[in-house]
């Protein structure tokens, strides 16, 4: 009896040890609607590197492996591919008129977001797309799909198809994230410059910088801003067509508001080889307000033309006001 008991205990211990080594698995069960793809290869990829290959047979294919929610892969069929998180369970992928993914929680959440984004389309109101993206990243900041959608760009308020996040929203999200998210290569640079970004957000006092004026003198933004006026900092370049087209509007605004406590400071990003072109453009375009030339990323300008508006207390109160929005704002400030 004692021997049988010993054997049972030993078996239980061995089974327990064996069970501890069993890792959760994923299964990707795929369906291909178009018979054109019958017999073709489907690839499970890490970026461009092929991890595993399956064949479309009777309109289906399967991948199975160890689950790892820290691994993002792509399922690729011909020119079509879709990202998949290798979470435990069965993941269903259908290649049809659109690619759909369902089954496991995080994959389902991401692909519902993806389909909603595509449903809105590029003509949708940017704010709706923006809010959709921000909410998804905020709610999924603890998984790889949150980081996948985040994709910050150093000098772009909006990323691919206008669906990215402003650099200020990026910083807000980074401050909610854990170290794994922050230490991702495409996030780390932003985490390191988060304070710089906050310093030029709306509500912050302007950050000073020094550049050349048309006569080659070194001048600072504070020589013109911070003098008790509303100040519009205009970022432009002589080679930028949209910038040139906005100048007549600035001339009108300058004539209208200059004597009411309004200043414009133009900051050109032309390099040294354009110095003469820059000086001649200032004269020919009748730009009578202060001019500076040089490069700075202190204000995280995503594109040109672009502007930043300061109030009389030198606080940033608006960014990128264009056309009627700028007219309305100045009329409100200086009635």
Image (cartoon, rainbow, N blue to C red):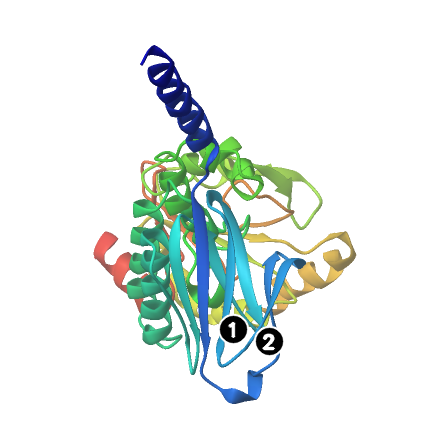
Q: How many marks?
A: 2
289 or 222, nearer to the observer: 222
Q: Secondary structure at mark 1?
A: helix
257 or 192, nearer to the observer: 192
Q: Is residue 153 above or below residue 189?
A: below
> Pointers 1 and 2 in contact (CB under 8 A)?
no
- Residue located beneath label 1 in the image: 245
User: Looking at the image, can residue 301 be seen?
Assistant: no
User: Looking at the image, can residue 118 be seen?
Assistant: yes
The numbered mark, 1 or 2, whose residue comes first in the sequence reads: 2
Q: Residue at x 38, y 72 (%)?
A: 118
Q: Residue furthest right?
A: 273
Q: Is residue 178 above or below residue 324?
A: above
104 or 15, nearer to the observer: 15
Q: Quadrant of the N terminus?
A: top left
Q: Which mark is residue 79?
A: 2
Q: Nearer the viewer, mark 1 or mark 2?
A: 2
Q: Residue furthest top?
A: 2
- The Cα atoms of the two marked residues, 1 and 2, are separated by 41 Å
Q: Is residue 256 above or below residue 312?
A: below
Tell me residue 17's x, y (percent). 45, 25
Q: Residues within 10 Å of mark 1 (few under 14, many from 20)?
A: few
Tell me residue 141's x, y (percent). 37, 43
Q: Secondary structure at mark 2?
A: loop
Tell me residue 56's x, y (percent). 55, 76
Does 308 sit left or right of 72 as displayed?
A: left
Q: Residue at x 54, y 78 (%)?
A: 57
Tell me residue 163's x, y (percent). 41, 62
Q: Residue at x 44, y 52 (%)?
A: 26
Quarter assignment of residue 6: top left
254 or 308, nearer to the observer: 308
Q: Residues within 10 Å of mark 2 (few under 14, many from 20)?
A: few
């Amino acid at each position: 009896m004692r021997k049988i008991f010993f054997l049972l205990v030993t078996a239980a211990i061995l089974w327990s040890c064996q069970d501890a080594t069993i890792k959760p698995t994923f299964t990707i069960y795929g369906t291909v609607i178009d018979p054109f793809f019958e017999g073709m290869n489907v690839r499970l990829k890490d970026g461009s590197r092929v991890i595993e290959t399956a064949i479309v047979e009777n309109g289906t294919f399967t991948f199975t492996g160890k689950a790892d929610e820290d691994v993002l892969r792509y399922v690729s069929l011909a020119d079509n591919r879709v990202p998949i998180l290798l979470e435990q369970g069965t993941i269903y992928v259908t290649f049809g008129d659109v690619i759909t993914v369902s089954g496991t929680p995080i994959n389902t959440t991401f692909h519902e977001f993806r389909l909603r984004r595509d449903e809105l389309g590029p003509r949708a109101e940017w704010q709706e797309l923006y809010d959709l993206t921000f909410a998804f990243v905020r709610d999924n900041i603890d998984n790889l799909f949150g980081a996948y959608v985040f994709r910050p760009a150093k000098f772009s308020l909006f990323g691919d198809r206008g669906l990215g996040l402003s650099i200020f929203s990026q910083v807000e999200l980074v401050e909610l994230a854990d170290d794994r998210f922050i230490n991702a290569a495409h996030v780390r640079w932003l985490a390191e410059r988060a304070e710089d970004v906050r310093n030029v957000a709306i509500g912050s006092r302007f950050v000073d910088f020094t550049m050349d004026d048309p006569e080659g003198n070194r001048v600072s933004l504070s020589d013109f801003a911070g003098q008790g006026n509303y100040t519009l900092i205009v970022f432009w370049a002589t080679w930028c067509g949209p910038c040139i087209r906005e100048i007549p509007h600035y001339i009108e605004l300058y004539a209208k508001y200059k004597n009411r406590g309004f200043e414009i400071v133009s900051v050109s990003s032309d390099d040294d080889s354009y110095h003469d072109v820059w000086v001649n453009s200032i004269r020919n375009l009748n730009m009578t307000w202060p001019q500076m030339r040089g490069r700075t990323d202190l204000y995280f300008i995503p594109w040109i033309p672009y502007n930043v508006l300061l109030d009389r207390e030198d606080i940033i109160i608006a960014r990128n006001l264009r056309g009627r929005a700028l007219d309305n704002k100045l009329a409100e400030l200086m009635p």
